[in-house]
Image (tube, grey):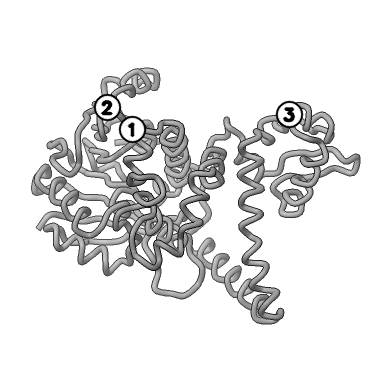
Amino acid sequence: MTSTAPKKIPPLPIIRGIDRVRAVLANLYRTLVPGHVALLELQVAGFLSQAISTAAELGIADELAAGPRTATQLARAVEVDEDGLCRLMRLLVSYNVFAQRRDGSYTLTRMGAALRSDAEVTLRDVSRFFGSPFHRNHWSHLSDAVRTGEAVGPAVDGASFFEYAATNREVGDLFDRAMTSISTMSTDPLLAAYDFSRFGTLVDVGGGQGSLLTEILHRYPAARGILFDLPTVVDDLTADLAAQGLAQRCEVEGGSFFEQVPPGGDAYLLKHVVHDWSDDRAEQILRAVRLAMNRSATLLVIELVLPEHRRPHPGKFIDLEMLVNTEGGHERTESQFRDLLARAGFTLTRTVPTAAPDCVLEARAR
C-alpha cells in the first residue's frame, strides 16, 4: 500500500530534549524566586486560560485573520466594549497569543492562529469548552472529587457527564467539536510515528466523527475502514464520507462498544476511549473488541501514557479531568495498561511514542 507523506514532524528525541530543558528551566525559576511568588504565578495561570477562552468565544482570531485591526475596529467587529477588549488583549499580547504593532493595531501570531475556526488544527472549540460555565463549574468542585473519588456531575447536574451532554446538546455539540479538535491535533504526529500500511481493514471503535480514520484512509488509499460509535454520533456521517470520496471505502455502523463491535478488521483502533472508563468498564470494552478480532488482528490503543518521572506532563492534567467528569476514568502508566490488557486477554507487544503526548499501545489477543 502507498501513503501520502505525513507533515514533517521534528524528531522525537529533539522534542523530548526540549521538553526536559524547558522543565528544568521552569523548575529552576520556581526554586530561585520566593515560594509565595512562584505559587501565586501558578494560581493566576487560570486567569490566562479564561482570557484565551474569552478570545475564542468572541472570535477575535477569525477577525484578525483578515489583517491588522485597531482596537476600535476590533471591538466593533466582535461587538464588545473597547476598553474591556484592550485590557483583554494586553494580557494576551504579553503571552504572544496575539501581537500588537507599533501603531497599536493587533495582529495574529502563530499561536493565536490556532484559535481561528478555519485553522487546519483549530483549538477554538477546545478553548471555548474549557472556559465554558459548565466546565468551569465542574472544576470548581475538584475538592469534592478528590474527597470522594467520584465525578461531580451527578451532584452538580443530576446526571453523569455523558448523560448530561447527550440531552443538553449545546454542551454536547461543543464537547464533540472540542474532542475532534484534540484528535486532529495529534493525527500528524501519530501518522509520522506509526505505519498503518500493513492493515487492509481498520475498525475505529468509538471513532466519533471519524477524523482519525478518514485521515488514515486518505493517506493509505488501499485501506478500508469501519467507523463505529453510538448511533446518535454516526447516523449523519455517511454524507460527509461521500463528500470526502470515501463512501466506497468506509462503512458506518452504530452500536455500543460495551456489547459488541464489528468483526472482520485487521486492526482495531481505540483512540481516547479507554481513559474515559474505570478498569472494569474498560476491560468490558476490550473484551468486546477481542471477541470481534480474528487471531491475526492487531489492537491499537491510542492514549496518553503517564510517565514515571515527576516533571510536568499533559496527562497529569487530563487525569484530574477524568476524576472530575467521568465515572472512574483515569490516565494510566504503561504498566497499568499492560495489566489492563492482560485482564482482557491481550498481550502488550510494544509501545510506540509520538511527538504528541499520545502513544500507540500495540497488542495481540492471547
Q: Residue at x 75, y 51 (%)?
A: 91
Query: Where does the image place residue 325, in percent across and percent down from the top left?
Result: 38, 52
Residue at which label 2 appears: 250
Observer-side mark, 2 or 3, equals: 3
Per the image, the residue denoted by label 3 is 79
Q: Quadrant of the N terminus?
A: top left
Secondary structure found at label 3: loop
Q: Is residue 61 left or right of 202 when viewed as pictured?
A: right
Question: For the residues marked 2 and 3, what is the alpha-carbon distance in whole angstroms?
Answer: 43 Å
Q: Nearer the viewer, residue 365 or 317?
A: 317
Q: Nearer the viewer, residue 222 or 301?
A: 301
Horizontal side of residue 153 vs 223, given as left or right: right
State the residue in front, 113 or 257.
257
Q: Tell me the CA gap for discs 1 and 3.
A: 42 Å
Q: Amino acid at mark 3?
A: Glu
Q: Is residue 45 left or right of 106 when viewed as pictured?
A: left
**x and y, in percent, of residue 324 in the image:** 40, 56
Question: Closer to the camera: disc 1 or disc 3?
Answer: 3
Q: Amino acid at mark 1?
A: Leu
| Image disc number at residue 274 | none
Q: Which residue is mark 1?
A: 217
**Quick one: label 1 or label 2, which is nearer the N terminus?**
1
| Label 1 with label 2: CB-CB less than 8 Å | yes
Front residue of 7/365: it is 365
Indicate which disc, 1 or 3, sits on the residue closer to the N terminus.
3
- Per the image, label 1 sits on a secondary structure element best described as helix
Residue 204 is situated, as x and y percent measured from the top left of the image, at 27, 39
> Which residue is at a point 16% across and 51% down the rendered structure image?
284
Q: How busy is the neighbourhood of tag 3: few (under 14 within 10 Å), some, or many (20 plus)?
A: few
